[in-house]
Image (spheres, rainbow, N blue to C red):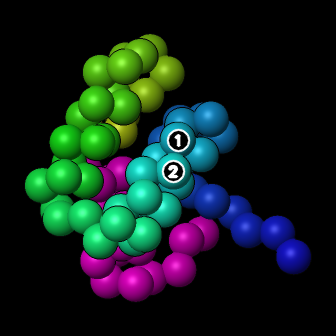
Amino acid sequence: MTYDISYGMFSTEGNLAVHGIVIAAQTLNLSVSKVEKLLRALADSDYDKFGEATDTVVREAVYEVVFLNAVVG
């Protein structure tokens, strides 16, 4: 079985990086503000690759999975 991991990032690499944040947030029970900081840190780490990590569509996709227990895809 395969899953389409998509959080609205422009690349597979970006979606996988955000997925790492999602897994960490779920595992460590992180707050919304901590997740926002991690998404900002990702965007700032390489804006050309991950700049959209703070876009509304990405944040909403992350929040749905982490805080509303939605399924990725």
Amino acid beneath label 2: Gly
Residue at mark 2: 20
Mark 1 nearby-residue class (10 Å; few <14, some 14–19, many ≥20): some
Asked whether the viewer can see residue 1, the reply is yes
Judged from this view, the residue extending furthest toward the right is: 1
On residue 17, which mark appears?
Answer: 1
- Tell me which secondary structure the magenta stretch mostly adopts: helix
- Drawn side of residue 62 relative to residue 1, left or right: left
Amino acid type at circle 1 is: Ala
Query: Residue 41 lies in what quarter of the image?
Result: top left
Specify whether 58 is left or right of 31.
right
Instruction: Return the x and y of residue 27 as percentages of the image width and height.
Output: 42, 69
Determine the secondary structure under disc 2: helix
Residue at 49% in and 21% down: 49
Tell me where the magenta segment starts and ends, as one range. 56-73
Give the residue at x 29% y 77%: 67
In magenta stretch: residue 67: yes
Quadrant assignment for the C terminus = bottom right
Q: Identify which residue is drawn at 52% across, 41% down.
A: 17
Q: Tag 2: Cα neighbours inside 10 Å, few (<14), some, or many (≥20)?
A: few
Q: Does residue 61 appear anywhere in the picture?
A: no
Q: CA distance from mark 1 to mark 2?
A: 5 Å
Q: Are marks 1 and 2 in contact (CB under 8 Å)?
A: yes
Residue situated in front as seen by the camera: 39 or 51: 39
How far across and how far down the image is residue 1, in percent?
87, 76
Q: Could you say whether the residue bearing mark 1 is in a helix, strand or loop?
A: helix
Residue 4: name its quadrant. bottom right
Tell me if residue 21 is in the magenta stretch: no
